[in-house]
Image (cartoon, helix red, strand yellow):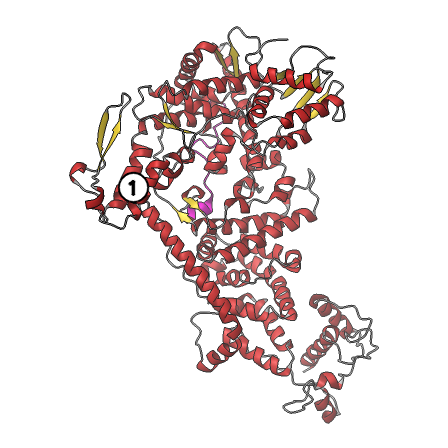
């Protein structure tokens, strides 16, 4: 009895601190009804109530206006106080139903309690029930179960209370139906390519998600209810984290996942109160779920509507952003060590893969990788105790493996990939430290490269740059040790000496010898020398080497590639007579460009980069690579007449060889005898697309990919970049923002941004047309493309090169340096600069 009385008194102190006594003229400073009282949150009020109980502080008498809000004393019952004035006590305190018998919640039970609270205009009983159930893991696991018995009377009650939510539910259903129809249309289109769609069946969970959503929608409009959910989540998370860390709760009870399903349906999780107090703790809990549970949660979310997936994505993104901008990170306190950011990123990964699974998937059409037979001989690296990392290709994310899907498999996600990038995080991330964690210390330290979706292409390219440089230094050290052991001449670099007028022959012979003798030499730092020229390669000579090789290889007269005037893109020429070594050379050149941080002027359709990353071309890829054929096949698929009679197509197709003579190819055995009909036209489209994009160029593309992989196979390229990012990495950006370049340009030799000639220079450059701007960029940096991240990432230097003179401006493309004489007039500056950028070619020592 003493324990019950103490508990009741503490509750009265708590109510006095949170709700007050109801007397507007109360002078008790420890009562919420007092005019000068400072409001307390529930946590602080609970602690204060304990303190007041210990010192036996006087309680306020309950004011009549609070005792009888309805001005009716019917149904009142005595308060549980051992007071000798029983009748007075009966009239002072209202009935306080606490529903302690409620151990879990159902939708009907919530509405039943809500109905009682609305009748008495006192929501505290429901608030206490919400706080008790939502702060208890066992109670929450049992709540809102599909298998709980539904009583007819409570169903009617639910209809009464849920009338205003029905329209919203109908809107959600319409959106879901529209998405399903769109997915079916996409699946039908993919069916034309014969793809194997990874369409998941329904993920079975015991929680009634729709009921949870209706309850949240009904209750969150009440501010006090929202506080109850928030405080309950704060109390819940420590116990759940302990359960997941030290007990196999999910293995013994898979319904434990219901906690996370129910909590994530709260549409207020993105509010500042949640971001500051509850969500960091909750994300830590979720990140400790075992892999099967994470995969199941991801599959479940993938079946949600776009609106629900976007809301979850924005919640985690806002938590990451809020935490990043609220803290300062220094060398001894990295963002990688921030548990809140790391946990939120791991949770965002689940939403990312749900976004992938819910999009248009193509889990088939994978290129067959050429596996090198294992060698029984010990390599030099093994002898020196330096076994190569990623020897068998890039690492695979465990969640990706568990789900059986890759980012590359998704042609069109529900939410664009770009929206998962968090720019504030990219701004504070120290990529050199993160790279170390990724390559060396991944077991004990978190690297954001394990969640590449959150990084922008510029940040990832920096990580790739570090990987390439370390690989270069490693090859250099291995070569030095090898030369000491063997007594041979030290050759720590990949040196190419070529003649301008025989550049393909010279490069082909040298690179072919290296590829046969020791492909690892391709991962050394590249140094190019043009015979008869004095330029020392610090990057600029290599840039021109790449440019000249590509100009020669892509020359239509050679016949290695075909050029489409409408798309301005190149494609492999099926009947090309060139040997495979030349296509291998092109692949090596692309790989070396990435490896040596050079930008190339190549014009391939996106399907080439998809194929390089391991996917075959399909019907949808024809849209940008072969638009005429794509349109014809699309019309065939959409044709509503008699396909067989009207079109008279068979499974035999015709093309021309290198000399213009027609050649035929059977897509199926005896294809000339099989007419295309409405029933088999999808198969025809699939086979035709496969022939155009894969089979007809199989010899050329395999050689091309082999060369590319000789250089990049051990780099994290595949696990970090998507095909469109690989294109950006190789080709740079064609969007030239010269104002961004002006902002980042530095000056030397007596120039500064306020000099007259510098102002004249930028006015002149800004007045150039698109072609002249590209020529200027080519003249100064060695390429006419912007690097990843735009021209703002390019560090150009303008150096004073003497007084007024008739000499032309010069440049050091290795260092992006422009040597500019101080011309007297703006007109002379423009004339000299245009002449320099128009006729620039070759290297010489000035």
In the depicted structure, whether residue 109 falls above or below residue 635: below
Residue 387 among those drawn in magenta:
yes
Q: What's the residue at 71%, 85% (across, down)?
A: 67
* For residue 11, side relative to residue 489 (left or right): right
Residue 581: name its quadrant.
Answer: top left
Residue at the far right in the pictured view: 27
Instruction: Tell me the crowding category of disc 1: few under 14, some 14 to 19, or many 20 or more residues within 10 angstroms, Cα based.
Output: many
Residue at the far bottom in the pictured view: 87
Residue 329 seen in the current view: yes
Q: What's the residue at 78%, 73% (across, down)?
A: 52
Residue assigned mark 1: 686
SS of the residue under disc 1: helix
Residue at the far top in the pictured view: 532
Name the dominant secondary structure of the magenta segment: loop
Residue 183, how many percent across, how many down? 39, 53
* For residue 530, side relative to residue 10 (left or right): left
Residue 134, how many percent across, how many down? 57, 67
- Number of numbered labels in the structure image: 1
Magenta range is 382-402
Residue 193 seen in the current view: no
* For residue 469, side relative to residue 187 (left or right): right
Residue at the far front in the pictured view: 827
Q: In the rendered image, which quarter contains the N terminus? A: bottom right
Q: In the rendered image, which quarter contains the C terminus? A: top right
Residue 414, how many percent across, how many down? 47, 51
Residue 200, how many percent across, how many down? 38, 54
Residue 481 among those drawn in magenta:
no
């Amino acid at each position: 009895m003493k324990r019950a009385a103490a508990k009741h008194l503490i509750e009265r102190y708590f109510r006095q601190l949170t709700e007050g006594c109801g007397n507007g003229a109360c002078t008790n400073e420890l009562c919420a009804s007092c005019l000068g009282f400072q409001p307390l949150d529930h946590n602080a009020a609970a602690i204060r109530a304990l303190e007041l109980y210990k010192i036996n502080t006087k309680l306020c008498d309950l004011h009549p206006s609070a005792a009888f809000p309805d001005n009716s004393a019917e149904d009142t019952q005595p308060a549980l106080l051992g007071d000798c004035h029983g009748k007075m006590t009966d009239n002072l305190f209202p009935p306080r139903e606490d529903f302690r018998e409620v151990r879990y919640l159902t939708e009907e039970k919530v509405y039943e309690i809500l109905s009682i609270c609305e009748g008495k205009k006192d929501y505290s009983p429901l608030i206490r029930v919400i706080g008790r159930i939502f702060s208890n893991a066992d109670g929450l696991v049992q709540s809102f179960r599909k298998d709980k018995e539904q009583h007819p009377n409570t169903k009617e009650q639910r209809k009464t209370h849920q009338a205003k939510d029905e329209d919203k539910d109908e809107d959600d259903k319409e959106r879901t139906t529209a998405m399903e129809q769109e997915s079916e249309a996409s699946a039908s289109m993919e069916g034309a390519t014969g793809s194997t769609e990874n369409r998941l069946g329904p993920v079975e969970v015991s929680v009634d998600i729709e009921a949870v959503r209706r309850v949240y929608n009904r209750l969150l409009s009440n501010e006090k209810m929202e506080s109850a959910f928030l405080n309950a989540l704060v109390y819940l998370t420590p116990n759940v984290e302990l359960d997941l860390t030290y007990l196999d709760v999910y293995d013994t009870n898979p319904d434990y996942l219901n906690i996370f399903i129910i909590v994530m349906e709260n549409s207020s999780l993105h509010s500042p109160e949640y971001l500051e107090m509850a969500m960091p703790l909750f994300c830590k809990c979720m990140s400790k779920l075992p892999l099967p549970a994470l995969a199941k949660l991801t599959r479940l979310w993938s079946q949600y509507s776009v609106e629900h997936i976007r809301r979850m994505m924005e919640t985690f993104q806002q938590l990451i952003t809020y935490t990043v901008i609220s803290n300062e990170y220094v060398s001894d306190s990295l963002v990688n060590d921030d548990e809140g950011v790391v946990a939120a990123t791991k949770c965002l990964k689940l939403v990312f893969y749900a976004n992938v699974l819910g999009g248009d998937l193509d889990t088939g059409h994978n290129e067959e990788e050429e596996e090198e037979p294992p060698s029984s001989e010990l390599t030099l690296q093994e002898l020196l105790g330096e076994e190569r990392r990623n020897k068998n290709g890039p690492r695979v994310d465990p969640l990706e493996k568990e789900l059986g899907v890759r980012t590359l498999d998704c042609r069109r996600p529900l939410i664009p990939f770009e929206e998962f990038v968090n720019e504030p995080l990219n701004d504070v991330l120290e990529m050199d430290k993160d790279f170390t964690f990724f390559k060396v210390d991944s077991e004990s330290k978190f690297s954001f490269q394990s969640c590449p979706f959150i990084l922008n292409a510029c940040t990832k390219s920096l990580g790739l740059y570090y990987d390439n440089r370390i690989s270069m230094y490693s090859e250099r050290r291995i070569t030095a040790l090898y030369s000491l052991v063997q007594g041979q001449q030290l050759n720590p670099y990949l040196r190419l000496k070529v003649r301008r007028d025989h550049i393909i022959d010279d490069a082909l012979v040298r690179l072919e010898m290296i590829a046969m003798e020791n492909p690892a030499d391709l991962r050394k730092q590249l140094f190019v020398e043009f015979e008869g020229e004095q330029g020392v390669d610090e990057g600029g000579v290599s840039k021109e080497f790449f440019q000249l090789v590509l100009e020669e290889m892509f020359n239509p007269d050679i016949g290695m590639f075909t050029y489409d005037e409408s798309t301005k893109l190149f494609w492999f020429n099926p009947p090309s007579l060139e040997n495979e070594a030349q296509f291998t050379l092109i692949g090596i050149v692309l790989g070396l460009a990435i490896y040596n941080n050079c930008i190339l002027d190549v014009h391939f359709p996106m399907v080439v980069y998809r194929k390089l990353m391991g996917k075959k071309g399909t019907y949808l890829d024809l849209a940008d690579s072969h638009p005429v054929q794509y349109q014809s096949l699309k019309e065939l698929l959409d044709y509503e007449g008699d396909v067989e009679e009207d079109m008279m197509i068979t499974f035999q197709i015709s093309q021309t060889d290198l000399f213009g003579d027609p050649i035929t190819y059977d897509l199926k055995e005896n294809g000339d005898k099989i007419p295309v009909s409405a029933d088999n036209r999808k198969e025809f489209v699939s086979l035709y697309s496969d022939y155009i994009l894969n089979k007809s160029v199989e010899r050329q593309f395999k050689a091309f990919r082999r060369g590319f992989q000789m250089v990049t196979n051990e780099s994290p390229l595949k696990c970090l970049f998507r095909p469109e990012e690989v294109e950006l990495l190789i080709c740079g950006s064609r969007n030239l923002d010269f104002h961004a370049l002006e902002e980042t340009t530095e000056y030397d030799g007596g120039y500064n941004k306020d000099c007259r000639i510098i102002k004249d220079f930028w006015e002149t450059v800004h007045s150039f047309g698109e072609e002249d701007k590209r020529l200027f960029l080519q003249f100064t940096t060695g390429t006419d493309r912007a690097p990843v991240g735009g021209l703002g990432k390019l560090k150009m230097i303008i150096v004073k090169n003497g007084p007024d003179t008739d000499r032309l401006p010069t440049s050091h493309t290795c260092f992006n340096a422009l040597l500019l004489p101080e011309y007297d007039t703006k007109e002379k500056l423009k004339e000299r600069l245009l002449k320099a950028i128009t006729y620039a070619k070759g290297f010489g020592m000035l």
